[in-house]
Image: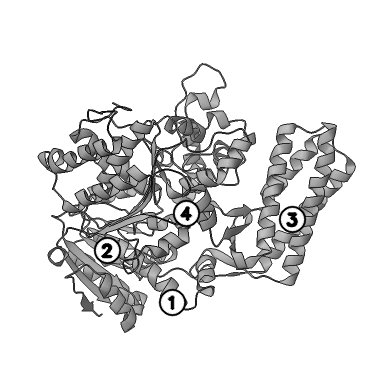
Amino acid sequence: MANTYPFDFDPKQSFIQQASDWIADVFYERLPEAGFELRDEQIYMAFQLERAYSEKQTIFAEAGVGTGKTLVYLLYAINYARYTRKPAIIACADESLIEQLVKPEGDIAKLARHLDLTIDARLGKSMDQYICLNKLEDARGGIEDAEAYGSIYASLPDFVHNPATMQAFYPYGNRKDYPELTDEQWKAIGWDVFQDCLVCSRRHRCGQTLSREHYRKAADIIICSHDFYMEHVWTYEARKREGQLPLLPEHSSVVFDEGHLLETAAQKALTYKLKHSVFESIITRLLNGEIRESLAVTIDEAIEQSEHLFRLLESSSRAIAGSERREVVMSDQLLKEVNRFGAVLAAIEEELVFESGLFTLDAYQLTIVEEHLEMLQLALNLFKRPSGLISWIEQEQEGITLVIMPKLVKEILKERVFSKNMPIVFSSATMSVSGSFDYMSASLGIRQALSFSVASPYDYERQMSAAVAAIGGQEKKLKLALARLQQSQGRALILFPSKEELLRFKLDIAAIPDFAAFRFLFEGTAEISHLIDAFQSDEASVLCAVTLWEGLDIPGPSLSHVMMWSLPFPPQDPVFTAKRRDAAAPFETVDMPYMLLRLKQGLGRLIRRSEDSGLITIMGNELADERVLDQVNRILPEGVRPELLSV
């Protein structure tokens, strides 16, 4: 029934009004008859979205846990997609959450089953969720995990290895297909930003390319991550200029699930990443043609200057406690070398203008080099104006990467996203600050938007028991964690603010025999949706995670305890250091709002259905500060009064 309506459509009447009437019938009659709970909050949200779709406006839909907001926006998105003959985009906070939306017992499957709908929903996964055939080739020839990579290579479809035509091509190589690989193992074979796909001889047989051809044909919904949607926005013009299709097709509406996280995704997508080895590999392509000696000399000079600049960046950067990133320490010498590198690049660009007239260089390769030089010049010019950007160094085995990120993205978002004449829905349980959406509107460049808030329907006073502990020492926290896990008999989600804290916890409990009574699952040791499935199916297990503060939906006894190992204050990395530097009262306006928002999201993982109940444990030495404790108490659901724990 793709591209057909689930109701009798009268073309003489407003489509949105007819769709809204049908959706009301669904919530008042169809779903309750199928055993679903009739929720006033859900019906209220449906009538609010009617206006957004009718007027093609942006709307902040703040709805608490249990309001059934996903079902509401799915029904509007599907019907509007069929009316406009363009798919809707559902953009989730990360890759693990998009898997939950399409799982067999997920909301899309429920709608299809109970409303007798055939819903064409396809995943548009980020590029880094697919195998890079070139990286796999290198990895299987290496020393570490060569057997595992060799097995993956052998399992690839025949058409990957066989150049013969007239074969049936299909998507393959998804991260989810290799759940046993750790994040580090996947990093060795997964696509990354430094892969030059345009000149890859295997690009037409690449799983990433084939998946794109698949999801672009979706009739109803394409589900992707915030990062992927922003990547589509930022690369749209460049891809068209290069004769490529945009990452996503033209679409009818967009839903940003967990929309409070969109600014971070936008910054990430607009980030420049510079690496010496990548520059050298691209610029030396010019040496394959017949070029003048002056250009060859200038290329050698550029490579030498690039090496020198990246050595200086490495030596002048400093480590940041609790972060894998290194801070760039600006100096006159560093700016001088950046200017010198820019001057050499400009000299190459001038040489190429003359060289292109001789037609001795391959036109395709020349375009690739010119695009890369243009990107480098833009990035270096930004780097020389540090007041408007955030930069840092990432240290890897094969060398350092200079990362340059703009502080503000609202002007570009305003132009490329919110100026579109289409409905845009922000959906989350936490978007307003003291009842106002002004903070989000201002940071995203949204001039005008509809908004509403509805509370969760659950009886938290009866269903949730909370405890806080103002402790920070590792030994005391381990002792309290063990006691609380014994109280809940496992069945817990432990949330960590950083990867470093999770790894330290993993190391420490290995030396304490009493922890062996529980099965622990650690994020990073396997593909995340595989870990979530294992946690849900093994009721007494304990899942330890860094990225699951938002969106995780596991009803029932498997998740009967949420433990926050530490208060989730933002890290001391360059992104938040820059925000603090620009704030008059950084703790009050940067650190506390971020911490409280994440903490509130973490609390929302516990009660997912009216039958659920369980424990909340919050640890952190900052809770000894009455101001912090008071703010934490304020975000707890009404009626929940925390017990003060000590060790």
Q: Could you tell me which residue is drawn at 53 percent across and 73 percent down?
A: 582
What residue is disc 1 on?
Answer: 587
Res 424 label: none
Are circles 1 and 3 on residues that touch, CB within 8 Å? no
45 or 488, nearer to the observer? 45
Q: Is mark 2 on a helix, strand or loop?
A: helix
Of callouts 1 and 3, which one flags the residue occurring earlier in the amino acid sequence?
3
Between marks 3 and 2, how big is the CA–CA gap? 48 Å
Between marks 4 and 3, how big is the CA–CA gap? 29 Å
Of callouts 4 and 2, which one flags the residue occurring earlier in the amino acid sequence?
4
297 or 353, nearer to the observer? 353
What residue is disc 2 on?
Answer: 603
90 or 451, nearer to the observer? 451
What residue is disc 3 on?
Answer: 306
Q: Is mark 1 on a helix, strand or loop?
A: helix
Q: Could you tell me which residue is drawn at 29 percent across and 35 percent down?
A: 14
Of callouts 2 and 1, which one flags the residue occurring earlier in the amino acid sequence?
1
Quadrant location of the N terminus in the rendered image: top left
